[in-house]
Amino acid sequence: MALIGVFDSGVGGLSILDESLRQLPQHDYIYLADSANAPYGERSSDWIAQRSLALCQYLASQGCDAIVVACNTATAEAIKQIRADISIPVIGVEPGIKPASMKTQNGIVGVLATEATLKSDKFNALLATLPGNCQFIKQSGAGLVPLIEAGKADSEETFELLAKHLEPIQDAGSDTLVLGCTHYPFLRKSIRKLLGDSISLIDTSDAVVRQLKRQLESINQSVDATGKGSVTFVSSKDGPALLNMAQDLLSADLNLHALETKALGAVLGGV
Ligand code: DGL
């Protein structure tokens, strides 16, 4: 079985881990959350690139066969450098603006992502490849990630902030919304409450895991979904707290897997 590293600034990448455990439960996973440094979305490009590279090098040193950079912000700022430095398959995640442009009926698409993702060259280069008849309403979700990290995804405070961020998207008449940060699928219920059932929500976790599957096949790893592997949660803040959050946020039954937690500082010498 393969060992797969899944990395995010915090708990957002659990939305990708959840889908991975559903489609590829037989493999072993290391989920790495840099919770001591979240949110990444308001940090500089250089900082995000260096930190993301160091954490992916750590995952590679643990013997991972593939790494999923389960963070739109880290993918936007660092994936090129990570791929150049690490020889195993590295799968990234990008806001699903292309599928959204194909799905929208009225051509008005909201994009909710971090400030860093929206400003990044990678995101803007992708945007430039899309047909000009689609209007993208780009909105930073500032402040949402820290609330989700604090276990307040379903709180009134989060709901109110989300309502404020979604207002321009709603006012423009968007019929499609891109969830451009892996933390945002955990706000799905509140988004539905605010925007209704008819808006299409675009979340790329299924596409990311299908890409992971293809990459595993290309390195001759089994994609036959039988058996259950282990999941190790590594956090730069608090491993057991991360495991508790995972148990709350994941729809996959974690208890079917062998579970372990580790502190990143201890294994990485404080990087
Ligand atoms: N989950 C990360 C993303 O997909 C987030 C964010 C952050 O730390 O700001 O962009």
Image (cartoon, rainbow, N blue to C red):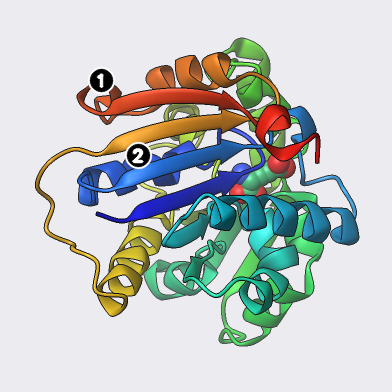
Nearer mark to the viewer, of 1 and 2: 1
Q: What residue is disc 2 on? A: 18
- Crowding around mark 1 (Cα neighbors within 10 Å: few <14, some 14 to 19, many 20+) is few
**Quadrant that contains the N terminus:** bottom left
Do we see residue 167 in this rendering? no
Q: Callout 2: 10 Å neighbours few (<14), some, many (20+)?
A: many
User: Residue 61 location in percent, x, y?
Assistant: 58, 54
The circle on residue 255 is 1
Helix, strand, or loop for circle 2? Answer: helix
Dividing the picture into quadrants, the one containing residue 29 is: top left
The answer to whether residue 88 is left or right of residue 28 is right
Q: Residue at x 72, y 26 (%)?
A: 146
Marks 2 and 1: in contact by CB < 8 Å? no
Taking the spot 68% from the left edge, 50% from the top edge, the residue there is 55
Given residues 212 and 131, the one toward you in this image is 212
User: Which quarter of the rendering shows the C terminus?
Assistant: top right
Q: CA distance from mark 1 to mark 2?
A: 13 Å
Residue 197, quarter of picture = top left
Q: Amino acid at mark 1?
A: Asn
Q: Position of residue 205 (x, y in %)?
A: 40, 53
Determine the residue positioned at 44% across, 62% down: 66
